[in-house]
Image (spheres, helix red, strand yellow):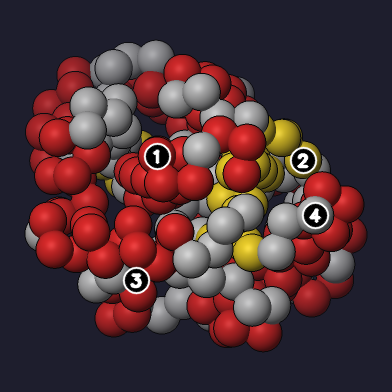
Amino acid sequence: MDNKYNRLKGVIKNLEKVIVAYSGGVDSTLLLKTCLTVLGKENVRAVIDASPIHPERETEEASYVASIMGADYIVIATSEMEDTNFIQNTKERCYYCKFHLFDSLWDIAHKIGFSHIVEGSNIDDVKDFRPGSRACREKNILSPLQIAGLTKKEIRSLSQKLSLPTYDKPSQSCLASRIPYGTPIDKNLLQRIERSEDALKILGIKQARVRYHGILARIEVGEDDFNLIMDNRNKIAEELRKEGFVYVT
């Protein structure tokens, strides 16, 4: 793990000036921290996407963590919600989303004279279906954690050694991932899902996803939180019915 981390620092050192696509998750936080350590604050910019597909609480947390690490950061709103290719919600949804994000990042890079953009995919991500990785290749976005061969488990261990507050943060995904392929994405639907998940977070549930199936909401939580869901099932059903769901499972 230490050898991989040294390799990561070597990859970053060669970049000189970088923009970090920053989500506030465990991967991009380690990446941002390492960029700051190797290149210095003046040569690093974190960019946080405040699109409707991301919960507002995640944007706020990302801004907070970036600030306590001493990073200069920018919050932007990308334009994927104006793209019919994204709204149609095909299996290539993530490709179109990342395509718009990376276009925005390159616009910023050119304005401030930075020559590289990095993002936080790790080596485990190679095993998954990730259409966004095609956008990385097409837009010349680097994935230093992946290049260094770091796994998610190693990234968490390194984050803990570096006292990063995200070392045990649950994995996150965008709100659009709660909507089945083929069901059009719209802002109102994303907001309903976000409010539904917020209602679960208030109960102290660490990680919750509310999957949209028309009039049915399907809640996903970890095993440790299952009893908390059952103990509060009537309250949860009431809150989700306010968002237009008839059935909650």
Question: Do residues under tags 4 and 1 come within 8 Å of each other at their CB atoms?
Answer: no
Q: Position of residue 246 (x, y in %)?
A: 53, 39
Q: Give the amino acid at mark 3.
A: Gln
Mark 1 or mark 4, which is nearer the start of the sequence? Answer: 1
| Residue at the image point whose x is 72% and y is 35% from the top | 75
Image: 21 above or below 14: above
The residue that mark 3 highlights is: 146
The tag on residue 113 is 4
Element type at mark 2:
strand
The residue that mark 1 highlights is: 37
Between 15 and 89, the one lying in front of the other is 15
Q: Position of residue 106 (x, y in %)?
A: 78, 62
The residue that mark 2 highlights is: 76
> How far, Cα to Cα, is label 4 from label 1?
20 Å
Question: Do residues under tags 4 and 2 come within 8 Å of each other at their CB atoms?
Answer: no
> How far, Cα to Cα, is label 4 from label 2?
18 Å
> How far, Cα to Cα, is label 1 from label 3?
19 Å
